[in-house]
Amino acid sequence: MDQLIVDCLTMDAARIDIARIHDEFTQAESRSDRLADAVGHAALAERVQAFIDNWDHRRAELGEQLATVRDHLETAVTGFAQTDQELARAVSGQRAEYPPRTAPEAVA
């Protein structure tokens, strides 16, 4: 393989989507707390609260994992964009110097 093609726009769109999902996960706790209060039956409310507690713990873990993926995507997008810019500058600099203005001397 002689070339690497990276679609930074797609990677950045994925990062944005992951960030939105992360925000939903981190903001959902306040909504879940109100659910147990809305259940009228005490035993059912107890079960709902147990589910909420377990889900809050798992959601926090997922939120951390989503933040890690988001951060890695941001690092990758930034790294590829910087590399692309550096390579473009290098190629532009070569074009200014190539082809040489004088022909190389013949070797006898």
Image: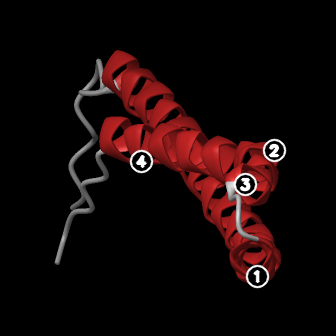
Q: Position of residue 38 (x, y in %)?
A: 71, 49
The mark nearer the N terminus, 1 or 4, is 4
Q: Gap between marks 2 and 4, in whole Å?
A: 26 Å
State the mark number for residue 15: none
Q: Gap between marks 3 and 2, in whole Å?
A: 6 Å
Q: Secondary structure at mark 1?
A: helix
Q: Which residue is mark 3?
A: 32
Q: Which residue is mark 1?
A: 43
Q: Which residue is mark 4?
A: 14
Q: Gap between marks 3 and 1, in whole Å?
A: 17 Å
Give, as a three-letter code, the residue at label 2: Ser
Of the two numbered discs 1 and 4 in the rendering, the one whose residue sits closer to the viewer: 1
Give, as a three-letter code, the residue at label 3: Ser
Q: Gap between marks 4 and 3, in whole Å?
A: 27 Å
Q: Position of residue 45 (x, y in %)?
A: 75, 71
The mark nearer the N terminus, 4 or 3, is 4
Q: Are marks 3 and 2 in contact (CB under 8 Å)?
A: yes
Q: Gap between marks 1 and 4, in whole Å?
A: 42 Å
63 or 27, which is in the foreground?
A: 27
